Image (spheres, grey):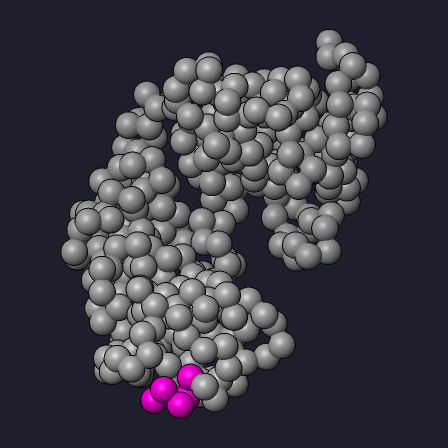
Amino acid sequence: MATEWGALQHAYGSAEDTPPYLCQLLNEDPEAQAEALGMLDMSVLHQGSLYTSTAPAALFVAAILTDPRTSAEHESFFPWDDRTRPLRAALLDWLGNIADSASYGEDPGSEDEYAAEHDGEDDDEREAIQACRSIRRELYDAVAPFLDDPHPDTREAALGAVTLLLKAPDLSELVPHAAHRLRSALAADGSRRERASAVLALGAWGQDTTGLLDDPDPAVRTCAALATGCAHVPRATAVLLEALRNPVEADHWFPDRLPHFDGWPRFTLLKAVLDRVDAFEDLAPAAMALIPLASDYTVDRDWGPLLVKAFPTGYTPGLPLSAAQRELLKAVTANDKCWGDIGNKFLWLRKAGLPDQRDAIRALL
């Protein structure tokens, strides 16, 4: 009530209609709660955008996390999200999304660098970003206690939010304590999902995960290998290549996909490997395992980058193909799903210096 909502903005104009939805989060009807969060998501955090109403709405949500009514379980307001979980978990996810948006393009440098980074934004946009960044410590204090919540969905959502909040430069001093907490959880007999999420969080904070590269669970050791601190660790690269040689198994490690993975896990693993391996020959066995899963729809995430890796300076007519290049082209041209009507593949083929047509590539073999 102390906030002048009418003076603030959300995606559809004045935020004066926001307070009823905030109060509706504490409705006794779980469906009304779900609707309220859905409306807030569409207005004060529309498609990840921040508004002047976002920060005060986030502070209200953070303040009600301990209310018993947020433990009510319900389905999402959105038809594409079929999860049933506590409202509290959904609210924690929502706060994490705000933290993620607030940190986009963030630089711990000077105010001049900040201004250059956000050049072209109007005053409201700058105010919204700065306001959301300024409340991250308050959000962290509200979210962190739920890392020990008895409900697994709430613990996972809290970890996701904490992971994103602690990427903020101004909260860096909190990382060691949070990392110690997660390492204690890793030592316990937790589920694959919880342990993998903890490892991914440690990696996101720049913590050392090399001690987990030989974990008995392939999902956990692979998540440890993804940490940027492992980029030049040969054992980590070997772990990623091992996982990619059985991509179907890796894709199904987590029945409900972890938010740390952008799409199928194999896409994230391949991106990391392509950055770390110098020669295509080193990842050729993994490539052969990936191509049967590839299609026109995945070309930007798998067989396109693989072609460029195999032909880093482009195919030169008249020069013999290496054995690895030949096997890759055979596999790609044999996969009918890669040769539909979608045109993205032509950009990758040209970048690799290869013909646009399937039969012309076959002629090279």
In the image, residue 157 sits, relative to residue 309, either above or below, namely above
Work out whether residue 4 or residue 105 is closer to the camera in this orientation and state it. 105
Residue occupying the point 75% across, 23% down: 9
Can residue 142 be seen? no
**Horizontal placement of 2 versus 185: left or right?**
right
Work out whether residue 317 or residue 335 is closer to the camera in this orientation and state it. 317
**Horizontal placement of 320 versus 37: left or right?**
left
Q: Point out the stretch of residues depicted in magenta.
A: 361-365
Provide residue 203's location: percent of width, then percent of height: 31, 42
Snapshot quadrant of residue 166: top left
- For this orientation, the residue located farthest to the front is 318
Work out whether residue 53 or residue 360 is closer to the camera in this orientation and state it. 360
Snapshot quadrant of residue 108: top left
Provide residue 363's location: percent of width, then percent of height: 40, 90
In the image, residue 204 sits, relative to residue 290, either above or below, namely above
Provide residue 104's location: percent of width, then percent of height: 50, 33
Residue occupying the point 54% across, 73% down: 296
